[in-house]
Amino acid sequence: MSHHGRAGAKVHGFVNPPVHRGSTVLFPDCESRKAAAKQRYEQVLTYGTAGGPTHHMLEDMIAEIEGGTRALIVGTGLAAVMVPLLAYLKAGEHCLMPDSVYGPARNLADGLMKGWGIETTYYDPTVDEAGMRALLRPNTKVVYTESPGSHTFEVQDIPALARAAHAAGAKVLMDNTWGFYNFQPFEHGVDVSIQALTKYAGGHSDVLLGSVAVNTPEDWTVVKTAASQLGQFASPDDCWLCLRGLRTLPVRLREQAEAGLVVARWLEGRPEVLRLLHPALPSHPQHALYARDFAAPCSLFGVVLQPRYSEADAEAVCDNLALFGIGASWGGYESLALPTAPSITRTARDPGLGGPAIRIHIGLENTEDLIADLAQALDRLPR
Ligand SMILES: *Cc1c(COP(=O)(O)O)cnc(C)c1O
């Protein structure tokens, strides 16, 4: 993490590489330009949209972290969701998506993809291998996964789903943002791993970026062709900020995840709380799957209040917090709290949370201060 993707002697010994901005790439003669163009999709500089040295350093680093052979950098996490979906699906084909999928991915499936004649079925994220086999159709080309699920944190049995999908000739795409650095997608049967680098990779709430990692030359050509036809590009300045964020990822992630567990365990003991939605807690329904597949958690989880409380009460808790910001996204150094019920859309199965829920992201503040802040906000709820 700290030595990968560094330019060394090429930058006069400075620790960090410079930012390379550029559109036009000049060649000494036409012959060398033709030779470069033949090496399509390699890390050869032909024109700015194909990426430059700053992109390539970040691509190498993400491929290393995800455990794949190549990675592609795009402008947002949502672009990283879009590129492989559009790359592997065409009119008349079928896509399976977990009911707990990140909301904007659902919007894409129900919006543009539907208009282009691609059908999507939403499935219960906790489905087992036989259940997945029953959902697959002859024209199913993509089994999309996201584990744990957005807002509700169901852990999926990725290897089982991948076995069923591959037996039916479908590709397995996974939004691995929650498991970044801690879940090795290609060891669990995933073909294409999607990251919102906006989250812990950037780590400072100042970058929007996404990545698509693959593990075969064939998949690389498919996703790179789609990204290039779709004009996907990321700013080199953002790539540079992300590279810089990644240098401290392991310590940030470890510190935040540990603090997150302390806060989650404390919340679990509070009388206002019905249950926690945290895969690393033994009380989580799919804790065994989490323990089998993930090396560690991150610091994003949910808390469900007792059924006697309303969504307005959940909002009041968030409003009364002083150290937690109210806002979208996560993975930065600051703690966040967000009532989640309004953002939960389900068409396959009611997640049955049992009460109003709040999504918590733990940052790098003092853990005792965060707990004291949560305590005073919960104390103000009606008894
Ligand atoms: C944030 C997020 C995205 C999208 O990332 P953006 O950079 O905000 O577009 C995709 N998937 C998950 C799970 C996310 O949390």
Image (spheres, rainbow, N blue to C red):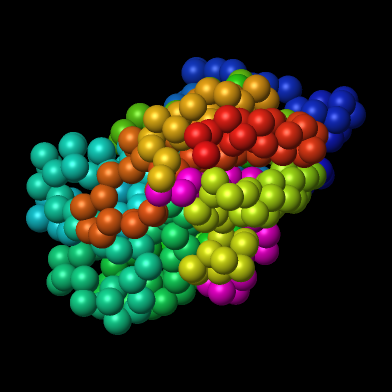
Q: Tell which residue pokes out farthest to the right in this image.
A: 13
Above or below: residue 185 compared with residue 232: below
Above or below: residue 147 compared with residue 161: above
For image coordinates 54% across by 46% down, the residue present is 272
Instruction: Report whether 372 appears left or right of 30.
Output: right
- x, y percentage for residue 152? 43, 52
Asked if residue 205 can be seen in this view, the reply is: no
Per the image, is 289 magenta?
yes
Instruction: Report whether 163 appears left or right of 53.
Output: left
- x, y percentage for residue 46? 49, 30
Above or below: residue 296 compared with residue 288: above
- x, y percentage for residue 258? 74, 50
Range shown magenta = 288-307
For image coordinates 58% across by 50% down, the residue present is 271
Q: How many marks?
A: 0
Residue 318 versus residue 100: which sits nearer the camera?
A: 318
Per the image, is 106 magenta?
no
Residue 131 versus residue 16: which sits nearer the camera?
A: 131
For image coordinates 56% across by 60% down, the residue present is 279
Residue 83 versus residue 349: which sits nearer the camera?
A: 349
For image coordinates 38% across by 37% down, the residue present is 310
Q: Quadrant of residue 124?
A: bottom left
Q: Quadrant of residue 350?
A: bottom left
Asked if residue 107 can be seen in this view, the reply is: yes
Instruction: Report whether 231 appears left or right of 25.
Output: left
- x, y percentage for residue 23? 49, 18
